[in-house]
Image: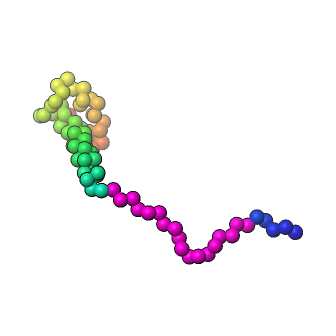
Amino acid sequence: MSQPNVVSIPRTGAVPRPDAIRIPLRDIVPWAIFTTLLALLVLFFVSTEAGAVSLVSDGLVHEFVHDGRHLLAFPCH
């Protein structure tokens, strides 16, 4: 009788670990600032556009983010 193909794994106890990638803080800061400003801009359009402060007067932005306003519990009517 022949034995099935068996792969033997050496039992050394050492598990290879990948090296951690180090990203300098000066490479992260511009992206963090950009992301924060973009998030604040989106929050502005969802929360206050077509209200007391409006950048676009025709109501198009209000209708575009209307369902998002209700989803985030912002009153709009």
Q: For this rendering, which residue is in front, 25 or 31?
A: 25
The quarter of the picture where the C terminus appears is: top left
The image quarter containing residue 51 is top left
Q: Residue at x 76, y 64 (%)?
A: 5
> Which SS does the magenta portion mostly show?
loop
Q: For this rendering, which residue is in front, 32 or 24?
A: 24
Image location of residue 62, percent across then percent down: 23, 31
Query: In this rendering, does residue 14 appear at all?
Result: yes
Total marks shown come to 0
Query: In this rendering, does residue 74 appear at all?
Result: no
Q: Residue at x 29, y 38 (%)?
A: 68
The quarter of the picture where the N terminus appears is: bottom right
- 40 to 4, vertically: above or below: above
Apparent side of residue 64 relative to residue 1 in the rendered image (left or right):
left
Apparent side of residue 26 relative to residue 15 in the rendered image (left or right):
left
Image location of residue 67, percent across then percent down: 30, 36
Image location of residue 58, percent across then percent down: 20, 23
Magenta stretch in the rendered image:
6-23
